[in-house]
Image: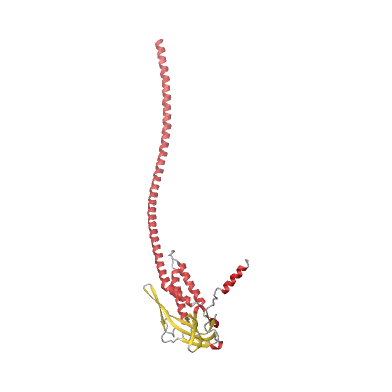
Amino acid sequence: MKKLIPLATLIFIIFVIPSVYAEPSLDVKITPEPEFNQLWAYETYNINITINEFNISETDYSELSENEYSFGYDTEIDVNRYGKYKYGGRSAGYTIIIPQIDPKVVHIDSKNNSITFNFTIDRDSYEYGLLPFEYLEIIISIKVDLNINENNSDIISTKSLKFTLIDETKVEYFEGKYRDIRDEIDTVLQASGLESFNREKYENILNEMNTTLASGNYVEAIEIWEHYNEKDRSDMINGMVTASNTEFVELEALRDVESQYNSLEEDFERLQSEYDQLENTYVALANTYNKVNQELETVKGNLSTAITAVFLTAIVFYFLGRRGARREVEVENA
């Protein structure tokens, strides 16, 4: 019984749930393959368009045979001029359809689900009338119809691709902008002091643009330059001002400390001088004390000798007096 449950589920999915068909889509291959969505001036490109996931049996015309319908491939190639201008800390972009340039239209009827044709870019940005800071956008719009007769057709699928025109003039312009960024950032990186300033951020910007140009990704170089021109440069200047103010405050605080140090040093020198005077006075007093002490010892010794002599003299006179008194008594008795 357990083995029948998965089988019943599979039958339910197959017969009960409606089938889902993939929508037709277009696969567009361009040779040589445009790197980084860039097309080069004076280059011829081979464009191959293929219809994928299309089945006549899934349409309302499923009864038609292969000889009763065809595909209509319509390709329109437009060029638009776009750029940016900056004002008051803001920027605005603009796009202009070049009026004197008619879109290139390619129409091909074919019974095959794939066609190929060539497309040549015969002008550069200067010849299109662009200013150095403007860019040319090439839009390739593709539509494929199912043609039943001259009066009956249905759109099968559409696709739009956008590219940026690159030429040698633009390459020189971007390389010049890189040198401008390098000169500005190198000046900042080589500046002494300003320890709180984030030099690494702007060094990374410089390295990133250098790497981008070296790889040939000029579309990315456009974005790096525009972001630097619109924001990073002003951030760098503001960062330097902030770092300068911080360093100025620290310098002022250091000057206060230095002033206090000088004052303390003067006090120390004064106290040292007073200490030296006290030390000299102490030495003088000590010498005087030693001298007086020696004199007192001498006087003390002399006094002790004198007292001893007086004492002995008194004893002598005492005994002499006693002896004389004894003689007087003896004389009186005789």
Q: Residue furthest top?
A: 334
Task: Say whether residue 86 is left or right of residue 219.
Answer: left
Q: Residue furthest left?
A: 88
Q: If the image is split into quadrants, where does the N terminus sit?
A: bottom right
**Looking at the image, which is closer to me, 237 or 271?**
237
Residue displayed at 54% across by 88% down: 68
Whole-percent x, y for residue 221 in the image:
47, 76
Whole-percent x, y for residue 223 in the image:
45, 75
Whole-percent x, y for residue 87 in the image:
37, 74
| Type of colouring | secondary structure
**Looking at the image, which is closer to me, 327 or 258?**
258
**In the rendered image, is residue 31 in sight?**
no
**Looking at the image, which is closer to me, 168 or 290?**
168
**In the rendered image, is residue 332 in sight?**
yes
Residue displayed at 40% across by 43% down: 282
Number of marks drawn? 0
For residue 64, what is the image quadrant?
bottom right
For residue 190, what is the image quadrant?
bottom left
Whole-percent x, y for residue 54 in the image:
54, 81
Q: Is residue 293 above or below residue 32?
A: above
Q: Is residue 41 above or below residue 226?
A: below
Q: If the image is split into quadrants, where does the C terminus sit?
A: top left
Q: Residue furthest front?
A: 1
Residue displayed at 49% across by 86% down: 153
**Looking at the image, which is closer to me, 185 or 130?**
130
Task: Say whether residue 260 is left or right of residue 39.
Answer: left
